[in-house]
Amino acid sequence: MGPQQPEASCWENTYVVNIQRLREDKRNGGYIFEDIIKPLTRQWAYPPVQEVVRGCLVEFHEGIIPKMIQWTTYPITAMLEIIWEKYEPKLDDRPEIDPQVIKMTSILERCLNYAHTGSAKVLPRGVMDVSWLSLGIIFDGMPTLSKDFASHAALVAGNLQVIPHAWPVYQATMRPMTSSNRVQVYNYGDSHFETYYASFTIKHGMKHFPDTLYPEVTDLTKRMACFAAEIALKVYIEDVKVLISQHVTASVQTELTSDHPQARRVAQRRSDALAQWKESQHPLAMIPHVVQELLRTITPHAIEVPQLPMSNLGNQTHAFFINSMLQVCAADNGRRKQPFIQGGNAVAVMRMAVHEITQLATQFPVHMVSNSDLISSIFIYVAKQLRIDFVPWSEDPTGLRGQPSTRILHNRFLSIGGHDAKHLDANATVLTPGEANTQIFRQSSMQIVHTNPAGEWSLLDVGLDKFHMMLHKTTLPIECATKYVGAMQETAIFTDTLNWSLSQFNPTSSVHKTVLFVALAITCLLPNVFTQFANKPNTSATIAQLEHYIRQLPCITLSRKGLTEKRPFILLVFSMFTLVYDTSAPILSNTEQKKKWFAKNSMKGITPFLLCCFRLARPTSLGALKAPRLGIDIKPYESDDIVSICDTAIGYIQANKEYGAFDALQYLAGSTIVEQLVKAGYLKSHPALPHASASSSKRTLDDLMPLSDHTSAATSYKHFKSS
């Protein structure tokens, strides 16, 4: 401190008045002002203090406070005026204003609320901190706007433009944050807010659409439409969770306070199961552990064989489910019907999503289907992606007069698709009571999942001999996932190729079912997926002789990496088949990437020649035996021929059940590969051929059925275009 510094100005004196120490008759504002504050202010008359303080004081006159508020809030009111002047002339035309502009207006008004009240509770920090507005107000006393949140160039030009990707989002769901959820719910209800929030989320997603969402859909506009449909269907799933949670919680609460220990234990188990089911990634999927927890949740007491109560409508399709929703959304009377839940928010959100997709449909090519069919197909596709395999439904019609009940029950469900599958036996006689109960629920859930065509299933778990039990499935096995083929995803185009192949799957096609069957057979041969050539045909050999020679070749192994990992082979074989038969694959237009793709697959033995070994491709010259060229030495069959071949293979599998796999592979691959699979224990030998390995019992594919004798109806080879 310098010698010229006035000592009296070097301290900021703070006085604390303890009201409790004052006499009761002096605990009032008059005494405090006259006898405490006035004496303290008189100290300012001390000359060194008075001269310093006088230059910092402003005398308040009447009406100064409103002027101070106008001065300190000028930046906020100026931005509000910019927004108003831009949109006010258009309000009569009811323009569609960007939700981010609306939310920015709300944020600026919150800043004005703080200026009027001084309460930080009016500042939603989650939304405002990113813009720096709340941070500037709290820490510096003045609002500050980050240039990373709003465009500085736009402000200079007299416009307010929020940078789309800078808007804050919830990390768990990636949905945009909002500052008006409680206000809207309080004034207008949940349904109004959910509709608004769905619109906000869709529009925000269109401006900052993540590349990881629906990568198999190549058209960006269609991906946005899928995004809009996903939001609506997720709100429906939340409605289902609320429905079941409310009913089960109400039932459990009374039992938890029961005097009977057994009743309390059952109630606690149901409560725990409800929590586990609600946390499932796909709570409406036909996945064993999901169905098991749901069964525990809705089953009020122990029963011998718990079942998921199903509607008498039987197994319906995703199209039935989606079209039922769209019919309710299109109705003018607004009456809530199945599958929408009373008190839920899905109807309003669904209507908003349909509106947004209809707007997007104007950007689709003019030659596409009608808007209604397009919207339906998009919702069906997304419903399958979200694994909506069953939904709550209403009570079965009683046959009495009047309209059937449309009230959705928490313990009645509609299965989406399906045929009967083989019953799975449950044997829990050697287990403890607790383990037996768990085993019963597990087996019941597995039976339900296997029965439903959309239920999750594993190709490797099923095996060749039981493949006939899965012919009703309308979904790919769990092995057909890109996460199992990590080495083949080193570039974006490789990943796109895998996703493209998956999008071609047609569950009604015998061709694709046969390819999955062949892929399973190849994984059973691992590591023996290479061929050993001996006594090659001469140059005068016919195509039929060449085909016969190839299907009698033994499979051997080579010293290569990755030949013991079975899961990747399912998807890689399926992808190889789709690339051979569909020249529209994106990777085929890139010569360099195409060579890398086929080279990587050939290192694992997955080549067009391997398809020839299983009668899924046709050799056309001796070049097929050495460095074959696709389209020259090896060609795909004509559409009618490949469908006819696959119809025959599936016919064997269906007709002969557990021995159908033997006959189908004998027809497709010949006796050599069949013998290897029988010897390895993957294939059950046909009872008509007890000595399948004996030379006298060998049957060639020509012995089983020549191509010209096929009697199954040949239909065009169809590809399912999910995008």
Image (cartoon, rainbow, N blue to C red):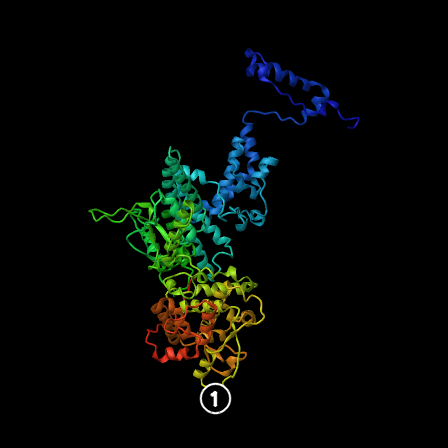
Depth check, front residue: 586 or 331:
586
Can I make out residue 584 in this image?
Answer: no
Q: Name the spot of residue 502 as percent of width and height, x first.
A: 45, 63
Query: Which residue corresponds to mark 1?
Result: 540
Query: Amino acid type of disc 1?
Result: Ser
529 displayed left or right of 712: right
Which percent across, then down, holds residue 312? 28, 52
**Which residue is more in the foreground, 31 or 236?**
236
Residue toward you, 65 or 265: 265
Question: Going 37% across and 54% down the picture, which residue do you hit?
Answer: 448
Mark 1 lies on a secondary structure that is: loop
Nearest to the observer: residue 476 or residue 179? 476
Outermost residue on the left side: it is 401
Which corner quadrant holds the C terminus? Answer: bottom left
Q: Residues within 10 Å of mark 1 (few under 14, many from 20)?
A: few
Q: Tag count in the figure? A: 1
Q: Quadrant of residue 256?
A: top left
Provide residue 231's location: percent of width, then percent of height. Answer: 43, 50
Q: Is residue 37 left or right of residue 565?
A: right
**Residue 715, how many percent across, how many down?**
35, 72
Residue 182 visible: yes
The image quadrant where one finds the N terminus is top right
Farthest residue, direction right = 3
